[in-house]
Image (tube, rainbow, N blue to C red):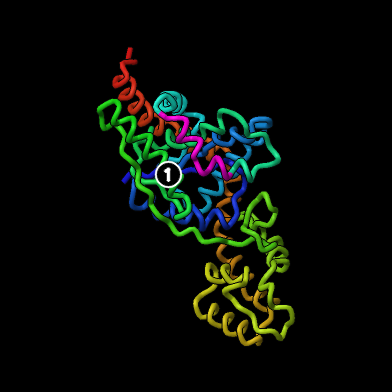
Amino acid sequence: MRIVSGMRPTGKLHIGHYFGAIDNWLRFQKEHECFFLVADWHALTSDYQDTSDIPSHTQEMVIDWLACGVDPEKAIVFQQSQVKEHAELYLLLSMFTPLGWLERNPTFKEQKQQITDKDISNLGFFGYPVLQATDVMIYKGQGVPVGKDQVPHLEITREIARRFNNLTKTEIFPEPEAILTETPKIMGTDGRKMSKSYHNSISLSDDENSVEKKIKSMVTDSNRLRRDDPGNPDACNLFPLHKKYSPMDTQQEVRQGCTTASMGCVDCKKILLPNINNWLNPIREKRLDLENKPNRVREILHTGNQKARQVATSTIEEVRKTLHLAS
C-alpha cells in the first residue's frame, strides 16, 4: 500500500507528536511504500504574514523525524513546496471541487473558532482541504493514517478523487482509505492536551534537567488534594506517561500505591523520570549528531524531493492528457 502523511513545520517536536504520528510512521515504513512530507505550503495558510521561521522549523522537525527513526532509505522524506506539481494539481482539482464541500468542511469551521489571534479569512485557508487532497492524490495515495476523529476530514479527499474520476470517465485516482491509528491523548504539564502553543510540552530534544523540571511541575489528579487521599490513576495526567515509558510491573506498583495512598505524586514522578529519560537518550544522541551535520538533512530532503517529483510529474502528465492540456 502507498501511504501519504505529513506535518506542518512547527520546529522541534514533543512526545505527543511521537505517539500521535511518528510511532505509526516507523511501523508503516517497514511494511509499505511511504511518502512523508513537510507541509510548508499549509503553514502559509495561517502564518503568511511572517514566514521567516519556516526554514529553521523545517530543519528542526526533520531532524526530529530522523532522530526518532524515520529512514529515508525506506520512505520518501520531502518538502511540499519543492515539488511544484502540487501547485498545478491543486489548481486543476479546485475546478472540480464544489464550493459547498469546502463550506461544510469541519476543519474550516473548527479552525475559524480556534484561531483567534490570526486573520485566516483568505482563499488559501478556505481551499486548504483541496491542497490536502492534492498532497495525497498526486502520489496516488492509497492510505492515510488518521485518528478516529479525523476520518470526516479525509472524506473530502475521497469525494474529490471520485468526482474527478466520474467526470473524466477515468480511474486515475484511487480513493484513499483511512488507516485508523491509535492517537493517545498525551497531556501537557498544565493538564491540557500537550501543545507547543500552550507552552506545556516535553520536547523530544529536552535535556534531563528540563524534563525533570517539567515532570515535577506537572498537574496530576486534581481530586487528590492531600498526600493521604487515595488517587485515581485513570484520572491522572501523569499516569498515561507511565503507560508509555514504564515497564508493566512499575505501572502496577504505581497504580496500587496511588489508589491506596501509600505513594504520593512526588514519588510517582521520581519513578517516571529515569524511564522517560532512558527512552529519550537515544533520540537526543541522534539529534545531536544530525545538528552537527546540517548538510546531511538538506541532502536527505533534496534526494526525497527528486524522488517525490518523479512520481508527481507522472501523475500530472496523466491528468494533463486527460484534460486535453498536454502539449
Spot occupied by residue 143 in the image (x, y as percentages of width and height): 36, 46
Quadrant in the rendering for residue 126: top right
User: Is label 1 in a helix, a strand or a loop?
Assistant: helix
Instruction: Please tell me whether residue 99 belongs to the stretch shown in magenta.
Output: yes
- Relative placement, left or right, of 57 versus 71 is right
The residue under the point 33% across, 40% down is: 175
Quadrant in the rendering for residue 234: bottom right
Residue neighbourhood size for the residue with mark 1, other residues' Cα within 10 Å, grouped as few (<14), some (14–19), many (≥20): many
The residue under the point 41% across, 27% down is: 93
Spot occupied by residue 327 in the image (x, y as percentages of width and height): 33, 12
- Relative placement, left or right, of 215 versus 105 is right
Three-letter residue code for mark 1:
Leu
Quadrant in the rendering for residue 16: bottom right
Q: Which residue is mark 1?
A: 154
Magenta residues (range): 97-110
Spot occupied by residue 308 in the image (x, y as percentages of width and height): 40, 33
Q: Is residue 59 above or below residue 317?
A: below
The residue under the point 62% across, 32% down is: 121
Quick one: 27 or 130, which is closer to the camera? Answer: 130
Spot occupied by residue 316 in the image (x, y as percentages of width and height): 36, 25
The residue under the point 61% across, 84% down is: 259
